[in-house]
Amino acid sequence: METIKGFKDDFLWGGATAANQIEGAFDEDGKGLSAADFVEYIPKEQRTKDNHMEVTSDVIKKALAGEYSGRFPKREGIDFYHTYKEDIKLFAEMGFTAFRLSIHWSRIFPNGYDAEPNEAGLKHYDEVFKELRKYNIEPVVTLSHYETPYGLIEKYNGWVGRECIEHFVTYAETVFNRYKGQVKYWITFNEINIINISPFTGGGVLSDLEENPEEAAYQALHHQFVASSLATKKLKEIDPEAQMGCMLARMLSYPNTCHPEDVRKAQVDNQLNLMYTDVHARGEYPNFFKRHLAENNITIQMEDGDLAVLKQYPVDYISFSYYMTLLSSAAPEGEVTAGNLMNSLKNPYLESSDWGWQIDPLGLRTLLNDMWDRYQKPLFIVENGLGAYDKVEEGRIHDSYRIDYLKRHIEQMKEAVKDGVDLMGYLAWGPIDLVSMSTSEMSKRYGFIYVDKDDDGRGTGERIRKDSFDWYKEVIATNGENL
Ligand code: BG6
């Protein structure tokens, strides 16, 4: 019997980014403001809450009136809007075959609801895609990566408003028509589950304006699900060769002990995390989720036809981010550590990053197998990586810790492929240092390419290849054989 030996020949290797974390130029060429433009940087010593992306209406009011003293680093990014040619050249030097980016929605429709798209915004992405094509790099494009246009926030409190569905579909249709034949892989919403953790980030929902913030977030989620399916429908009509994916922040939970109550708690936590991909891939809300809503007195308003649309237009592939695993306990007690927007009990068998995220390469193999068994649809890892402090020593960055992290994850990914998982590709998060999503820091670096810029926005912006640059180049050149 033949067994699978390794990655397929057309496996996609590269890196992933988001417009709001790299582009800068937040008000150039007709771009409107978006949610990310209001997320401020707070120095570590002054942080008093876990979730700094949850902006309040007061911050927005003051920022718009010019009365806010804080800095908004996502407005500056790493200036990719102007440096994309030299940056893409560096990606090409590493041998990237794919590069994930998002279109900043408010570059195309500055308020989100405008009657006509902004030609300058469309033209910009024409150029970016052209540059990628020059090096045979496949763009993987996210339509919405925490970038709800401010106009929609002001008018409808973001995705709580059903009107967002129509505006999103118009935006999707516009870019599908424009970039037809140039973009093969699309993703509707980045980490769609974030809407229930940080509603402002995920959907421009200002929770302080909602009487029942939890219910509002679920309502916004439903609108995103419907919008995603309708966008998939449009894509199939406009560019049948292209593929649509969904995107989940996959948070695998282990039982804290073998006590049946902990095992059951982990099962529930995993179900509630996978519910999002269940809807996208199978086209219906699972019953455990309906029960969860009912038991928590949450009602989602739906219109006739919504459920039929979900069923009719599921995604072609499932993409996800993977950074760490969590522990589930029916009676949580003990040391807690941070994670990607979710805190967790500390797992004594795992090391953590400088930000407390628990490093678990084997968890990647486990969840790849689980997700393949559950969905039997191609999977795509579109984010994974280590946020770490880097030191420049005589012009070099010796980031052996990053190489070690990535190597161990890719090894497990290879094992999963040998187990039979249909995996499309691997995109490392932040191939070039960028502004952190959760803390708006520059010093939390993920890149193979160092960017000379600090947390206060100072620096030359110079790009320097780290040791991991040469390492990743070899990994790609050998299709994952030399790690
Ligand atoms: C993912 C997001 O959750 O994690 C990215 O999709 C983000 O936007 C990444 O940057 C890493 O998180 P952070 O907070 O370290 O930037």
Image (cartoon, grey):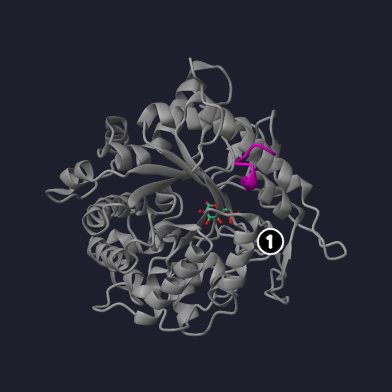
Residue 250 highlighted magenta (yes or no): no
| Quarter in which the C terminus is drawn | top right
Q: Is residue 328 above or below residue 306?
A: above
Q: Ligand 1 is located in which of the four quadrants?
A: bottom right
Closest to the observer, 338 or 279: 279
Q: Is residue 455 above or below residue 2?
A: below
Q: In this view, does 479 lie to the left or right of 291?
A: right
Name which quarter of the figure residue 475 lies in. Answer: top right
The amino acid type of the residue labelled 1 equals Ile
Residue 68 in percent (x, y) is at 55, 79
Badge 1 marks a residue whose secondary structure is strand
- Please tell me which residue is depicted at 53% across the width and 59% down the height of the picture: 17
Residue extending furthest right? 394
Closest to the observer, 217 or 391: 391
Name which quarter of the figure residue 315 lies in. Answer: top left
Residue 204 in percent (x, y) is at 39, 63
Residue 72 visible in the shown view = no
Secondary structure, magenta segment, majority class: loop
Residue 407 in percent (x, y) is at 68, 40
Which residue, given by chain and number where applicable, does mark 1 sit on? 449
Crowd class of label 1 (few under 14; some 14 to 19; many from 20; radius 10 Å)? many
Query: What span is colored magenta in the figure?
Result: 476-483
- Please tell me which residue is depicted at 49% across the width and 16% down the height of the picture: 260
